[in-house]
């Protein structure tokens, strides 16, 4: 049975009437979601330390550099999550468009002197106290909050093609800003994917969506294959996206240059076997570039084996199941669609990260939620979890 917290009875009324029975006010709170979330964060901190201790010592002279920073962000994130969960989520409907505009404005600042370049990508804003902010994370929150508002206001109009196009245009504009202002294709895909999933949830017909996705994916893969064969011998210059496609098609041919990270990650997965070498025993973590970020799953596979990776994916599956439960039982359509958007974000990000590590798709730079290193990412993920818990806190149980 799901966890619940019962509010105390009004004893004064009982004394006054003698015969009057007061109803128990049952307040739901998804402790299962909270437990999975905390476990994922703690596991992430352990694996982050294991993966980054060597590189941290070499680069900063402190093996716990990344661990301490991530632990601080996790602690702050838990506080933010609690605060957000106590706020009535309906209030966000009034400010959703402002958040949408703020996201675009913050991403535009990346193109000003306030923007900084990290590892060849200009996607961050410089903050005081040697901190950085990735504005594209705000775009995810904006899509999660605004798209449900538009859908709710449209009513039955969403069932028409015109309504679907109108809703997706909001998500498309935001995704376009993510791509053109921060040069972040993977996050742009996630932002637009959130919009598509929300429309899919409310639309009465599912077959057209499944058909479009299937055909679109097949055409995309065919196009990438054709493009890859055409540019095998071409001069790629500084076009890193074309390089990633080439590496994806034939990583072993570029194991010493562009495909070094991919190949070392695959070596780590292969050497781990089914049960792994043991926690802290990874060898490849000393040579994989930026292993604490998007390639941390390869270290999990090497140290804990395929079994450990399956356990991690099962934890994400349980997290998604709890989000699905909240979405299905939300008190209104707005709350339901907010959680559906959060579900879409987490699911898409996990799928993309796993696919990149296994070289099923070209490298994207997408991190593994709650496990990979990243202050901005963990803070905004905790805001989303606060939104989900806030919706769950208003579910009425019979």
Image (spheres, helix red, strand yellow):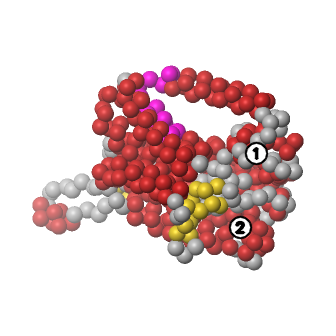
Disc 1: which residue: 237
Task: Say left or right for 41 vs 5.
Answer: right
Q: Quadrant of residue 254?
A: top right
User: Which quadrant does the C terminus fall into?
Assistant: top left
360 with respect to 24 (left or right): right
- Residue on which the image places disc 2: 49
User: Which residue lies at the image location 79% right of the left edge and 65% below the top edge?
Assistant: 280
Residue 12 screen position, x and y as percent: 17, 67
Disc on res. 36: none
Magenta stretch, residue numbers = 192-208
How many other residues sit within 10 Å of disc 2, few (<14), some (14-19) or many (≥20)?
many
Q: CA distance from mark 2 to mark 1?
A: 36 Å
Residue at x-position 63% and y-position 73%: 68
Looking at the magenta stretch, what is its main secondary structure?
helix
Residue 332 visible from this viewpoint: yes
Residue drawn 29% across and 51% down?
Answer: 94
């Amino acid at each position: 049975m799901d966890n619940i917290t019962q509010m105390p009875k009004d004893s004064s009324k009982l004394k006054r009437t003698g015969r009057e029975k007061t109803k128990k006010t049952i307040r739901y709170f998804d402790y299962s979601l909270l437990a999975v979330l905390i476990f994922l964060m703690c596991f992430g901190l352990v694996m982050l330390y294991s993966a980054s201790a060597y590189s941290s010592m070499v680069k900063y002279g402190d093996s716990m550099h990344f661990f301490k920073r991530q632990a601080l962000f996790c602690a702050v994130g838990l506080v933010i999550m609690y605060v957000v969960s106590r706020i009535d989520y309906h209030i966000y409907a009034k400010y959703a468009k402002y958040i949408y505009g703020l996201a675009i404005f913050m991403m535009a600042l990346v193109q000003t002197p306030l923007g900084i370049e990290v590892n060849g990508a200009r996607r961050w804003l410089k903050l005081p106290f040697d901190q950085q902010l990735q504005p594209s994370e705000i775009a995810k929150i904006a899509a999660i909050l605004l798209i449900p508002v538009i859908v709710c206001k449209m009513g039955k109009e969403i069932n028409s093609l015109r309504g679907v196009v109108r809703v997706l245009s909001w998500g498309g504009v935001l995704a376009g800003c993510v791509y053109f202002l921060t040069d972040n294709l993977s996050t742009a895909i996630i932002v637009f994917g959130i919009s598509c999933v929300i429309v899919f949830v409310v639309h009465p017909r599912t077959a057209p969506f499944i058909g479009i996705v299937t055909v679109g994916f097949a055409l995309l893969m065919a196009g990438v294959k054709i493009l890859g064969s055409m540019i095998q011998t071409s001069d790629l210059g500084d076009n890193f996206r074309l390089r990633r496609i080439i590496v994806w098609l034939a990583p072993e041919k570029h194991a010493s240059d562009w495909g070094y990270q991919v190949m070392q990650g695959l070596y780590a997965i292969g050497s781990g076997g089914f049960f792994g070498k043991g926690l802290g025993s990874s060898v490849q973590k000393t040579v994989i570039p930026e292993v604490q970020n998007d390639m941390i799953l390869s270290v999990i596979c090497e140290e804990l084996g395929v079994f450990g990776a399956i356990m991690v994916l099962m934890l994400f599956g349980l997290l998604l199941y709890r989000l699905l439960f909240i979405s299905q039982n939300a008190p209104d359509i707005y709350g339901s669609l907010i959680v559906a958007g959060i579900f879409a974000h987490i699911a898409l990000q996990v799928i993309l990260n796993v696919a990149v590590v296994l070289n099923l798709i070209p490298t994207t730079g997408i991190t593994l939620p709650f496990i990979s290193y990243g202050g901005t990412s963990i803070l905004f993920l905790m805001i989303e979890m606060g939104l989900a818990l806030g919706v769950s806190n208003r579910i009425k149980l019979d």
